[in-house]
Image (cartoon, helix red, strand yellow):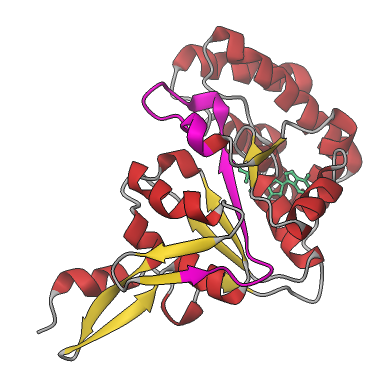
Amino acid sequence: REPREPRDQVAHIAPHHDGVRYPDAEAPYYLATGNECDVFAACHARGLPVMLKGPTGCGKTRFVEHMAWRLKRPLVTVACHDDLSASDLTGRYLIRGGETAWIDGPITVAARLGAICYLDEVVEARQDTTVVLHPLTDDRRFLPIEKTGELLEAAPGFQLVVSYNPGYQHALKDLKPSTRQRFVALQFDHPAPAREAEIVAHEGGVKPSVASALVELARRARRLRDQGLAEGPGTRLVVATARLIAGGIPPMDACRVALAAPLTDDPDLLAAIGDLVDATL
Ligand code: ADP
């Protein structure tokens, strides 16, 4: 029997280039809020790594997908978690049928292909990942693969992009200055009301009037941060609520299950959001 551990690891490390997304025929829908597309394209042309800062669900991932399409680059996305190590990113030896084979990890795949490599929530990853991230952000972008001894120079088109939510960082989990100062940082935020309503109508499949009402509700709920709500509803939650309404769920119910309940377990805050729903819809 094969040892259990290596087989279990196969799933996360993108063997055979699974997890590489090639540009579709149609552009992923992204509504820009400023000149972020031009800035990103300029960074791409100059090989500069980019950090996307901002709250959850405000369009960072969609932006990267859209830019990868525009720049005609493959996209490799890694959702970082607190167990993610440098070797999860670079790759590892696996034993298969008694033979040992090297399997590139996602960042190695991206560096070889000249892809955009998006590390979502990079602060979550283990500290040792800086060993691979720092050399990839140097002028000569290379990836040291410790286990094989390979020093891989990133192919043209490779770009490192990370996302980071300053809202819920605590002192123990913050990016070190030596890491953050290697990136160009683009700030994301909840879009202005008219734009957010346009996004919600497009993505959620609801009429503009419904989209505007949901956005107004979300804006009011975001103010509950002052009353202890950890983070207000992102556009993702507003879109999910709209989709339920478009699917025939009564708006009050949709708001309760898709907008209020995912945000908090606190009964007082839930009641406050419930009042907002009653007052807004
Ligand atoms: P993040 O990566 O910031 O957590 P996402 O990019 O996954 O958030 O955005 C969540 C959802 O919100 C997207 O799937 C999309 O439906 C919608 N969305 C948010 N902002 C935009 C935008 N500017 N243009 C298009 N869709 C957006």
Which residues, given as a range, are shown in magenta?
Answer: 152-179
At a point 35% along the width and 56% down the height, the residue shown is 86
At a point 72% along the width and 18% down the height, the residue shown is 220
Q: Quadrant of residue 56?
A: top right
Q: Quadrant of residue 125?
A: top left
Total numbered circles: 0
- In the picture provided, is 50 more to the left or to the right than 200? left
Residue 166 among magenta residues: yes
- In the picture provided, is 196 more to the left or to the right than 261? right
Res 247 seen here? no
Vertical arrangement, residue 264 with respect to residue 275, above or below: below
Report the residue that reaches farthest toward the top.
227
Report the residue that reaches farthest toward the front.
140
Vertical arrangement, residue 62 with respect to residue 258, above or below: below
Vertical arrangement, residue 194 with respect to residue 10, above or below: above
Report the residue that reaches farthest toward the left.
1
Q: Position of residue 281 (x, y in %)?
A: 77, 26
Residue 156 among magenta residues: yes
Vertical arrangement, residue 118 with respect to residue 56, above or below: below
At a point 49% along the width and 54% down the height, the residue shown is 135
* Residue sitting nearer the eye, 26 or 279: 26
Position of the N terminus, as image quadrant, is: bottom left
Q: Position of residue 168 (x, y in %)?
A: 49, 26
Res 134 seen here? yes
- In the picture provided, is 52 more to the left or to the right than 5? right
Q: Position of residue 255 (x, y in %)?
A: 64, 33
Q: Position of residue 169 (x, y in %)?
A: 47, 26
* Residue sitting nearer the eye, 4 or 170: 170
